[in-house]
Image (cartoon, rainbow, N blue to C red):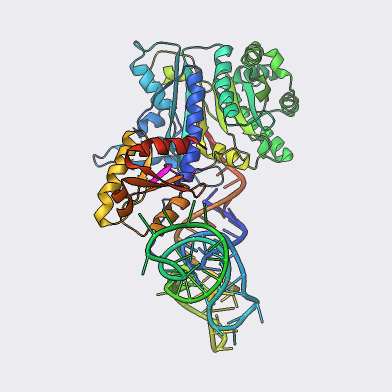
RNA sequence: GAGCCUGUAGCUCAACGGUAGAGCACUUGACUGUGGAUCAAGGGGUUGUGGGUUCGAGACCCAUCAGGCUCCCCA
């Protein structure tokens, strides 16, 4: 007890119940992706540190990546994100891939962060990217993929919202306010923090990064202007496209959405649960037109988003939308009577499986009450017994555990009888 | 990196500074070839760890470890 070895901090253990939820998320993500013609792919789980160092800040890589030296002395890291691997793989086959390219992926990622609600050090992430198109309609498609997922898991527009903004729009506004390009990243960060900071402190911070009081005043007006998007040709087209794609009810404009990432160049969006206890983003994404060129490929416009499994998992559970866990891995148990008759049990089980049925065989001779209790705990529907009496009479005892009724059927008719009973519910 | 909270049976939790308990789960039996319900019995603990205060510590103090939550950060 004292020396019990616990799971590594921030990792997650998936008991079958949790596995069911993870697979539910995976299945719906796959269905949404495939509905739009995206192809599944994946990259390595371990990458060299340089892949991320090139794009992300050194600070970020040192502090938040699981990095270690392998036996050959190379510095490697457990992947903290997928986009750099995506960019490299696309650049490597740029000539043969068919563009516009639609790829999706669902796999594990690691980030060395402080675990708390909605955030662990090990998580799964759904990534969806559309490479080689730069239209607002392409951006709208990605949002539609996300909405298709939200809808399919049962999340309504009343409780889920995708908030959209556009960096081009913000840049135009900054231009009008006389904020120079080199200052704009700081201003984006400023906007990103507004909801988290005390208003007075936020204004002090704004002045600190070099804005004039007049600029701050106009910036504040800008950030509550819900119709600002109408001045953006891209966003106007985007919202028309969302309307045509029947997902407009899930989406709203919000000038406060900026995304922390440096590489976004146009549309940015984040999905939130409006009514739940988790105030973290469910998903986030945007347009990143320069990234592929930045990592050494040909310039290619791109747009994508990612959704972690942790936050959405909590939301689905809180909303009562997580699938009911069915403890029964198979509808049929074949009991094992004793040492002398266990081969009959195995033969019967095998026959049923050959007929395409899912069958659990009790793996050792045991008292029947124990075996029936086992069946009950697993919510197994039918228990089949083939002991000395049955063998002597050439029959099999089939007990329907749902009704408690037991019948004896001739050995040769077992498959048919079992099928009939299972179809009867 | 900072702060708050929590560590007692397999699980969820009690116990005024005074003999460590309950519920659930588990095992066995009532019921030796048939599950759920009921009843009975039983197994289970260095109270996270190390010090200290006290006649006496699960409780109070210090340290430490672990977990949870929040801030920071968020590819």
The residue at the point 38 percent across, 16 percent down is: A297
Instruction: Answer yes or no: is residue A21 visible.
Output: yes
Q: Position of residue A129 (x, y in %)?
A: 48, 21
Q: Position of residue A59 (x, y in %)?
A: 46, 38
Q: In which quarter of the image is residue A231?
A: top right
Q: In this view, does A55 lie above or below A393?
A: above
Q: Where is residue A176 in the image (x, y as percent from the top left)?
A: 69, 16
Query: Viewed as shown, does residue B8 lie left or right of A295?
Result: right
Q: Is residue A341 above or below residue A309?
A: below
Q: Is residue A336 above or below residue A325?
A: below
Question: Along the line of sight, which residue is nearer the eye, A409 or A204?
Answer: A409
The residue at the point 66 percent across, 15 percent down is: A243
- Please check the rendered image and state whether residue A327 is part of the magenta-colored stretch, yes or no: yes
Question: Along the line of sight, which residue is nearer the eye, B28 or A54?
Answer: B28
Instruction: Answer yes or no: is residue A60 visible.
Output: no
Query: Viewed as shown, does residue A171 lie left or right of A387?
Result: right
The residue at the point 62 percent across, 13 percent down is: A241
The residue at the point 54 percent across, 41 percent down is: A324
Question: Along the line of sight, which residue is nearer the eye, A398 or A70?
Answer: A398
Q: In which quarter of the image is residue A166?
A: top right
Query: Viewed as shown, does residue A290 lie left or right of A348?
Result: right
On-image quarter of the N terminus of chain A: bottom left
What's drawn in magenta, residue-wise? Answer: A325-333
Q: Position of residue A71 (x, y in %)?
A: 25, 42
User: Magenta region's main secondary structure?
Assistant: loop
Say how many tags the image has: 0
- Please check the rendered image and state whether residue A330 is part of the magenta-colored stretch, yes or no: yes
């Amino acid at each position: 007890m004292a020396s019990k070895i616990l799971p590594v901090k921030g990792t997650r253990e998936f008991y079958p119940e949790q596995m069911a939820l993870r697979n539910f998320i995976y299945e719906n993500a796959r269905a949404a992706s495939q509905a739009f013609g995206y192809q599944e792919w994946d990259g390595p789980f371990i990458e060299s540190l340089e892949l991320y160092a090139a794009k992300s800040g050194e600070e970020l890589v040192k502090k938040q990546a699981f990095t270690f030296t392998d036996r050959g002395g190379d510095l490697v890291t457990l992947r903290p994100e997928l986009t750099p691997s995506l960019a490299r793989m696309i650049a490597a086959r740029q000539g043969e891939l068919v563009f516009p390219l639609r790829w999706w992926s669902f796999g594990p990622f690691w980030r060395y962060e402080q675990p708390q609600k909605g955030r662990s050090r090990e998580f799964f992430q759904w990534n969806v990217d559309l490479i080689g198109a730069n239209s607002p309609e392409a951006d709208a498609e990605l949002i539609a993929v996300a909405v298709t997922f939200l809808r399919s898991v049962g999340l309504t527009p009343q409780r889920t919202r995708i908030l959209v903004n556009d960096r081009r729009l913000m840049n135009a506004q900054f231009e009008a306010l006389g904020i120079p390009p080199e200052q704009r990243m700081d201003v984006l960060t400023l906007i990103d923090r507004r909801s988290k900071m005390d208003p007075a402190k936020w204004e002090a911070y704004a002045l600190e990064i070099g804005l004039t009081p007049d600029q701050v005043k106009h910036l504040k007006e800008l950030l509550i202007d819900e119709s600002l998007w109408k001045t953006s040709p891209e966003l106007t087209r985007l919202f028309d496209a969302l309307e045509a794609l029947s997902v407009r009810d899930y989406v709203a404009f919000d000038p406060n959405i900026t995304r922390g990432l440096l590489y976004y160049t146009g549309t940015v969006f984040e999905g939130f649960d409006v009514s739940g206890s988790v105030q973290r983003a469910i998903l986030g994404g945007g347009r990143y037109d320069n990234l592929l060129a930045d990592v050494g490929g040909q310039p290619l416009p791109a747009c994508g988003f990612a959704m972690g499994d942790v936050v959405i998992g909590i939301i689905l559970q809180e909303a009562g939308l997580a699938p009911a866990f069915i403890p029964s891995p198979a509808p049929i148990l074949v009991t094992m009577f004793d040492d002398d008759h266990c081969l009959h049990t195995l033969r019967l089980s095998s026959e049923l499986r050959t007929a395409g049925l899912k069958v659990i065989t009790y793996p050792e001779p045991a008292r029947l009450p124990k075996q029936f209790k086992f069946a009950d705990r697993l919510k197994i529907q039918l228990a089949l017994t083939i002991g000395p009496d049955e063998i002597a009479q050439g029959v099999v005892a089939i007990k329907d555990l749902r009704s408690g009724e037991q019948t004896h059927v001739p050995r040769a008719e077992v498959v048919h009888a079992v099928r009939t009973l299972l179809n009867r519910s």
